[in-house]
Image (spheres, grey):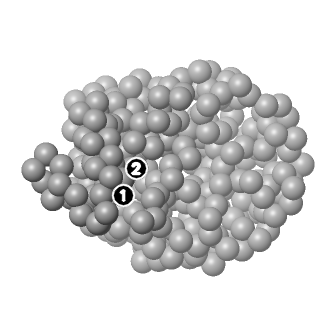
Amino acid sequence: MSIEIISKARRSLLFVPGLRPDMFLKALGQPADIVCIDLEDAVALPRKDESRNLTMDLFSRSYDTQSEKMVRINPITTRHGLSDLDALFDLECPPDALMLPKIKSANEIRILDELLSTENTRQLNFCVIIETNSALEQAIDIARSCSRVTSLILGGVDMSADLRCKRDWQSMLYTRSRLVHAAASAGIDLLDVPYLDLKDAGGLERETAASSDLGFTGRAAVHPNHLSIINQIFTPSQDEIERARRVCKAFENSDTGLVVVDDELIELPVVRSMYRVLSIAKMIESR
């Protein structure tokens, strides 16, 4: 049986603006699994070059942190996006991953995979924003396009505009379901769009729980106050961990692909999901 190996926990992603390097340093001390510097939506066009220079200066040194360090570059079809990519080649300590906006096809990812093949860029992972009709149509191909794609993230604002629908959770259910299918097919993580009402903790909790139930593995945030709720929802409970241990132990002691645990017949797909629970729990415990 093929067991999905989880190398990182990606429950929460905290965005910080590219013009505020001080916020990046503070964010590394927050309980975010990923800290992402935003050079795209968070920066006005006249200040793109300034934000790039400030951001790239941050990667002249390494950081003692377990948070995954990510940079959201500008679209690769724009001058600023190409300049962002060019700046990566000279970095002494590159980020762990790039967030890629406005992607429309898997071929764009494959081209980037070939382009970023130098010694200090070949280890960069990709988090792809699905925010266009074209990307949604090709979501599975994008998710499987190369081994560097470790996560997808829903771009709710642009996606809802493209689909001509409202931005609320229920109106975007079709889109979310398509992305769950794509991410699960590729065995990668899937992050939901940030919850923008910073004072509505109840709404954040309800909506994030619904995303988790649907199959999302994490959620982005624009404020650190949201991290505790997000992390709690995407962390396996102790009961879930104990059940996963029982299922995995029973499977390992079985000569068939079927086991019975707690009077329930368990088949291979469920066993795989139980190994994933244990892997995520182990990653979180080691932080």
Residue 194 placed where, x, y %?
41, 42
As helix, strand or loop, the secondary structure at mark 2 comes to helix
Q: Which mark is residue 272?
A: 1
The structure residue drawn at horizontal position 72% and vertical position 43%, both measured from the top left corner, is 95
Label annotation for residue 276: 2
**Depth check, front residue: 276 or 159:** 276
Left or right: 209 in relation to 161: left
7 to 223, vertically: above or below: below
Measuring from the top left, give residue 223's x and y in whole percent.
Answer: 46, 29
Residue type, label 2: Arg
**Separation of marks 1 and 2 at Cα, in angstroms:** 6 Å
Tell me where residue 165 appears, x and y as whole percent.
28, 64
Position of 50 with respect to 11 (left or right) is right
Query: Would residue 14 be seen by someone viewing this image from the given angle?
Result: no
The answer to whether residue 257 is above or below residue 193 is below
Quadrant of res 50:
top right
Contact? badges 1 and 2 (CB < 8 Å): yes
Q: Residue at x 53, y 23 (%)?
A: 30
Q: Report the side of 2 relative to 173 (left or right).
A: right
Going by the numbered disc 1, the residue's amino acid type is Arg
The answer to whether residue 118 is seen in the rendering is: yes
Q: How many marks?
A: 2
- Residue 199 vs 244, above or below: the answer is above
Asked which quadrant contains residue 254, the reply is: bottom left
Which residue is pictured at 51% across the width and 76% down the height?
Answer: 141
